[in-house]
């Protein structure tokens, strides 16, 4: 998906919501457990009920890989089921030496039809470059994450700048706003103004809204640019809005609420 297509989807829907499909077999409604593929069936109903309110879906691959072959099959069916109008993100946080990263890129961009994949940058340019070489695909690099451990490395200073600042400044020269995004956690709202100064034109994938406590209002105020430049992800708050048979209806209601709030900020 090209940048302009994504922007048009955001403007036409009045939404920059990304729904996270962090599907945990132990948390889906019990009414689905007798289904031949309960994970995919859960995802299918979530997608059907939320697609009018969001512009992207993020599949956290760990929840599928932990189920072995069945989980990988469910992930493949899920990504193929997501409409082509929506950005399809593999939240895989890959990154290794060049020839290994080339295989990761092939897995998510050729074997599986994802539009984007999250990547860890700490092994340097050669670990990220294979992802950037794919046309009309997005590489989403970890910038400043929402977990407490961000203090251990990302928020350490050296030479007058934080490590995350060096990452943003350096990585932004490897690609362009047409193929490169950054992950910036919603719980780091206080840093968004500085981050936007460093990368004024890039899109940010922002996890941590909802269950993790990030503020959509703060993020929208501090990080939005002239082309919106945001994909705000909500996972558990939407997909586990209900543990009963009405789970899809409740997911629709929560995602609609996010979209309506987002519309008010555009």
Image: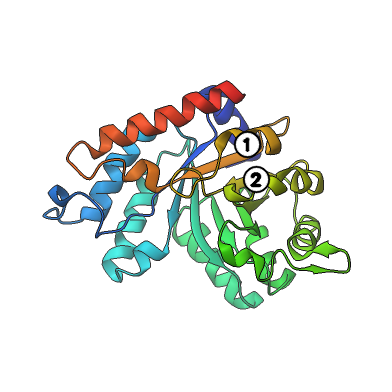
- Relative placement, left or right, of 115 versus 236 is right
Q: Residues within 10 Å of mark 1 (few under 14, many from 20)?
A: some
Whether residue 178 is visible: no
Whether residue 58 is visible: yes
Q: Which residue is disc 1 drawn over?
A: 218
Q: Quadrant of residue 37?
A: bottom left
Reply above or below: 14 against 4.
above
- Relative placement, left or right, of 199 versus 128 is right
The x, y position of residue 94, in whole percent, is: 56, 68
Tell me what residue is drawn at x 81 percent, y 57 percent. Answer: 169
Q: Residues within 10 Å of mark 2 (few under 14, many from 20)?
A: many
**Sequence-wise first label, 2 or 1:** 2
Q: Nearer the viewer, residue 229 or 216?
A: 216
The x, y position of residue 211, in whole percent, is: 43, 47
Question: Residue 189: which numbered mark, if any?
Answer: 2
Q: Secondary structure at mark 2?
A: helix
Q: Nearer the viewer, residue 127 or 80?
A: 127
Tags 2 and 1 in contact by the CB under 8 Å rule? yes
């Amino acid at each position: 998906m090209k940048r302009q297509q994504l922007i048009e989807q955001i403007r036409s829907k009045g939404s920059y919501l990304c729904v996270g499909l962090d599907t945990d077999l132990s948390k889906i409604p019990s009414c689905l457990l007798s289904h031949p593929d309960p994970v995919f069936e859960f995802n299918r109903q979530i997608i059907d009920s939320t697609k009018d309110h969001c512009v992207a879906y993020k599949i956290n691959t760990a929840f599928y890989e932990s189920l072995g072959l069945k989980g990988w099959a469910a992930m493949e069916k899920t990504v193929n089921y997501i409409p082509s109008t929506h950005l399809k993100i593999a939240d895989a946080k890959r990154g290794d030496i060049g020839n290994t990263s080339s295989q990761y890129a092939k897995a998510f961009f050729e074997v599986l039809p994802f539009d984007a994949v999250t990547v860890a940058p700490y092994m340097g340019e050669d670990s990220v470059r294979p992802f950037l070489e794919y046309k009309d695909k997005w590489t989403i690099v970890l910038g400043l994450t929402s977990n407490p451990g961000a203090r251990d490395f990302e928020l350490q200073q050296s030479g007058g700048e934080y490590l995350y600042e060096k990452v943003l400044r350096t990585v932004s020269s490897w690609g362009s706003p047409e193929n490169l995004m950054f992950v910036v956690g919603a719980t780091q709202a206080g840093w968004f103004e500085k981050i936007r100064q460093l990368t004024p034109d890039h899109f940010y994938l922002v996890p941590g809204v909802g269950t993790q406590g990030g503020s959509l209002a703060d993020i929208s105020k501090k990080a939005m640019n002239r082309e919106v430049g945001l994909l705000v992800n909500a996972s558990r708050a939407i997909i586990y809005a209900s543990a009963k048979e009405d789970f899809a209806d409740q997911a629709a209601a929560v995602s609609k609420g996010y979209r309506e709030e987002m519309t008010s900020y555009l």
